[in-house]
Image (cartoon, coloured by chain):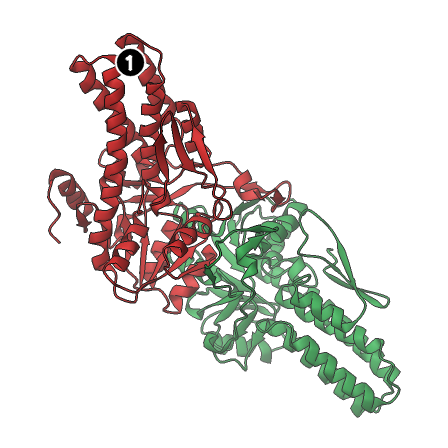
Chain colours: A green, B red
């Protein structure tokens, strides 16, 4: 299992996703501020992984607190939560994980626990968020595998793999689930400019797993579909609104339009922690705009002339009507999503398919 | 005027398009073989520019010939034509320009001209191809400007500008034509992976012209269209089949699909030298596949892990049904293209619009 985020004593250890695939460098964060910075600068990225890192970062930060009274400890706790919440705006898993840590804190306070007891509880909660994420990915993989035809040529975008989660992956979890069922599949990975998560991370993960992977530039996906070379599209998600509209890495919307033009099923794989029932539709999802330099420069080389403007949204929104199904840890939600997503939350059992 | 390709004495001088926008370096080719190499390695690129460079390269090569008899000179001439024809397979302007040089050669031979006279004739023919290309671009600009609404936000792909032609440009010629009519327009330039012609060349040309230009990664075009930020798409072409199917830089097809989804007019601008009536449809256009390294590496940095496969077609084909009009130097051809393209060749006058 890839160590996307792991607690080692008084540090949170993450593989530096900016350096892959040529360098495997691990970053040790010793404070909550260092974890927040790692999220903001994309040492760790991917909606579920961001949530896990934030929760573990809060637990790490509070473990180091020198506060002896619960009141001072509480003030520090909420400040640390704010620090994490300010890192990136789109992935709702971040806010979901912070909310879970807050609920855990409140329960501890209400139970009259000591500072040391609360520290233990926060550690356990963060580790639970981590472990549940892996379990969710494996469940998504098992459910999602059913929609993968044997021999499928699967297109994916960005990295929705082990590196984007606590392990196993969402979209790549579905691919791994199909392989685990004995299906032979091949994968086409969009390189995913400007950060190249597909070329650098998805290809790296899948090649390690021995799954045949072809990297293409983002603008080749349409031509491949036009030639009948793609059977299925599976992507992850950063936030899914109540009606099924899905924010995911920039370029996802274009893929969804192209998939429909070519009658190719387009699936989203995401845990319920990515579903935000309080956001009614895609128009209400905040979209992070990142620095122009990600587009204007690469590896120290300047790509664009001085004077050119740049637009650099990190995500776009795919309207629910383009999505054949949303693969969750409780089964596959189908349209109308307003009902099926709500039902997924309401039931402990799997969704009948 | 940008000196895309210019004859200076015994050399052909080209701006090195691989080095822009950060370095303006001029390459001097002194032999036909050096010109062929410049075309193959994309010192010069863009269908019309390739044709012009090939014709001027043939004239340059034959000027240096030491043959005294016409028979030996003819053998050298046809060998030089073969050398040029083997550089790149998709842009039909290359073969069109070589054919024109061959016809000029045949006419000279039939007229009983001496080797020196033939050299002069080849020089004149190559220069005529160059000059006519500029004139064609200006005519395209004037016709095409009519389809550009005032205030239009125009998306273009790759570089179909002065650098892709002998000067002024095809798609960028249309934009320049609109500006010349006093229309205020803004341009969005796809960066156009893997060679980044949009980020490096289109943005460079337009910023020099004072036209507001925003560079986006290729995967952002769909999201921009979805937000209602694009009014018009104009691209160039590398080969247009008799039925209007158009080969152009990889990614063009996806843009055409996205444009139709969003009810945005999609235009192709190209001189008739790009139209190949002997190719019935897009399925018969040969598509160049370039080296994997263009995708796997950038500026010395490795982007993909060892073991990942790569697909790197330089072009794709946009079926004619996605194209609102083909802007030529004789006017705008409209569907059905089988008729309108043929008519454009048959008339000396402008196409009635």
> In the rendering, at what x and y percent does residue A256 appear?
44, 61
Q: Chain of mark 1?
A: B
> In the rendering, at what x and y percent does residue B174 appear?
27, 53
Above or below for B148 versus A109? above
Residue at 87% x, 89% y is A69
Taking the view exactly as shown, the residue that stands out farthest to the front is B9
Dot 1: element: helix
Closer to the camera in the image, B327 or B28: B28
Above or below for B266 versus A119? above
Judging by the rendered image, the residue that carries numbered circle 1 is B74
Q: Is residue B275 visible?
A: no
Q: Residues within 10 Å of mark 1 (few under 14, many from 20)?
A: some
| Side of B19 relative to A46 (left or right) | left
Above or below for A303 versus B296? below
> In the rendering, at what x and y percent does residue A103 appear?
72, 84
Residue at 45% x, 28% y is B37
Q: Is residue B34 visible?
A: yes
| Side of A168 relative to A215 (left or right) | right
Find residue B58 and report its image quarter. Answer: top left
> In the rendering, at what x and y percent does residue B256 appear?
34, 54
Residue at 25% x, 64% y is B149
Q: Give the number of marks.
A: 1
| Side of A95 relative to B144 (left or right) | right
| Quarter containing the N terminus of chain A | bottom right
């Amino acid at each position: 299992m890839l160590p996307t985020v792991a607690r080692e004593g008084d540090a949170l250890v993450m593989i530096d996703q900016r350096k892959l695939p040529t360098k495997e460098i691990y970053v040790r964060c010793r404070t909550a501020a260092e974890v927040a910075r790692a999220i903001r600068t994309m040492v760790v990225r991917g909606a579920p992984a961001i949530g896990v890192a934030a929760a573990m970062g809060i637990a790490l930060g509070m473990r180091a607190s020198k506060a002896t009274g619960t009141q001072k400890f509480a003030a520090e706790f909420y400040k640390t939560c704010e620090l994490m919440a300010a890192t990136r705006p789109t992935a709702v898993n971040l806010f979901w994980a912070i909310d879970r840590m807050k609920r855990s804190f409140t329960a501890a306070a209400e139970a009259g626990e000591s500072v040391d007891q609360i520290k233990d509880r926060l550690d356990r909660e963060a580790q639970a968020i981590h472990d549940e994420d892996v379990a969710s990915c494996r469940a998504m993989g098992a459910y999602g595998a059913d929609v993968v035809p044997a021999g499928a040529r699967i297109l994916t975008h960005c990295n929705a793999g082990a590196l984007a989660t606590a392990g196993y992956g969402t979209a790549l979890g579905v691919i791994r689930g199909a392989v685990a069922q004995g299906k032979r599949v091949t994968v086409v990975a969009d390189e995913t400019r400007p950060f190249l998560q597909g070329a650098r991370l998805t290809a790296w993960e899948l090649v390690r797993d021995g799954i045949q992977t072809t990297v293409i530039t983002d603008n080749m996906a349409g031509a491949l579909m036009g030639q009948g070379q793609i059977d299925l599209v599976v992507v992850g998600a950063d936030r899914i609104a109540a009606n099924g509209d899905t924010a995911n890495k920039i370029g996802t919307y274009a893929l969804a339009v192209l998939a429909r033009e070519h009658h190719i099923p387009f699936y989203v794989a995401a845990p319920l922690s990515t579903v935000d029932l309080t956001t009614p539709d895609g128009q209400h999802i905040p979209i992070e705009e990142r620095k122009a330099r990600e587009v204007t420069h690469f590896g120290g080389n300047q790509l664009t002339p001085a004077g050119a403007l740049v637009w650099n949204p990190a995500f776009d929104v795919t309207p629910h009507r383009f999505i054949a199904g949303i693969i969750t840890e409780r089964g596959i939600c189908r349209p109308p999503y307003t009902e099926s997503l709500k039902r997924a939350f309401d039931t402990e059992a799997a969704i009948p398919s």
